[in-house]
Amino acid sequence: AARETFPGGSRVALGGREVGGGTLALMGGPCSVEDREQILTTARFIAACGATGLRGGAYKPRTSPYAFQGLGHAGVELLREAGDASGLPVITEVMEPGDVEAMAPLVDCFQIGARNMSSAPLLRAVGRAGKPVLLKRGPSATLLEFVLAAEYVLLEGNPHVILCERGIRTFETATRNTLDLNAVPVLKELAHLPVVVDPSHGTGRRDAVIPMARAAVAAGADGIIVEVHPDPSKALSDGDQSLHLHEFQRLAEELGPVARAV
Ligand code: PEP
Ligand code: MN
């Protein structure tokens, strides 16, 4: 992943476009796929706003084992259907190495969640699958540890890795995590991989998502990934940080001018 090995910076193909290389990726979708109508409505709406990818969790790494755990494989199938209906490539989290094979034909990009960033067997499994990987930074991982986690995927012969800053644990309690925008320029200096930012998990607060997305783009991020839901008040996970559809539209409108200015 060392920058010296690829000074121009690598690009990851995703749904007929590229992440990295100067264009801005805008990925959105609910924290969890909940039902057909929820994911189809979201997918069609964000596609019309110019989104370049659809996210949605089906296997959820919830803090509490009593909280909604996701729809599992049925959720992956609904996400695929929504991706096809909207023309968007789909990104979803895989938690178990044993699920990679069954999920691979349905997904365009595997997400490795923050809690699993350093799970070597999982990293090797998505490495072997050969599909793009969105690797989230662990909540207390240093940037060097983060890049070394990416190396596990690359070493399996899979170069299609996107790094995602999603906030780290600090003493601050006003936000869920502290979005570490230092990561953007520092990762770009350390590694040649595209870097995207998740201001939803990075802040945990809907009101902070758009400002921090603008800041991430200004800092040089190759893309943004956010949570958006047709009715955040009814979301089964992460409703407090999910944008309403009209807010996603505003986000899409506001990022263009920031991207052109950097
Ligand atoms: C998610 O994307 O919904 C998620 C669980 O993210 P993270 O792994 O960054 O907490
Ligand atoms: Mn979430």
Image: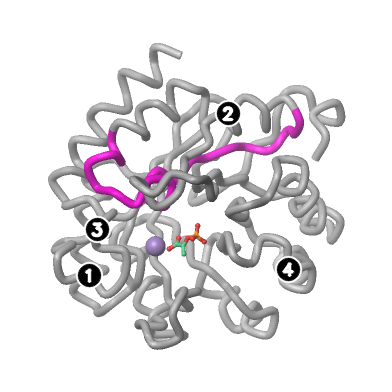
Q: Which quadrant would residue 138 be assigned to in this image?
A: bottom right
Identify which residue is drawn at 41% across, 80% down. 77
> How many numbered tags mark residues here?
4
Q: Which mark is residue 119?
A: 4
| Tag 4: amino acid | Ser
Name the secondary structure under disc 3: helix
Q: Earlier in the sequence, mark 2 or mark 3?
A: 2
Figure colour scheme: one colour
Q: Earlier in the sequence, mark 4 or mark 1?
A: 4
- Highlighted magenta segment, given as a residue range: 190-210
Q: Which mark is residue 235?
A: 1
Residue 135 percent across, percent down from the top left: 62, 54
* Left or right of residue 76: residue 4: right
* Left or right of residue 25: residue 149: right
Q: Nearer the viewer, residue 119 or 101?
A: 119
Q: Which residue is mark 3?
A: 240
- 169 in relation to 98, above or below: above
| Tag 2: amino acid | Asn
Q: Earlier in the sequence, mark 1 or mark 2?
A: 2
Residue 108 percent across, percent down from the top left: 53, 62
| Tag 3: amino acid | Asp
Residue 55 percent across, percent down from the top left: 40, 60
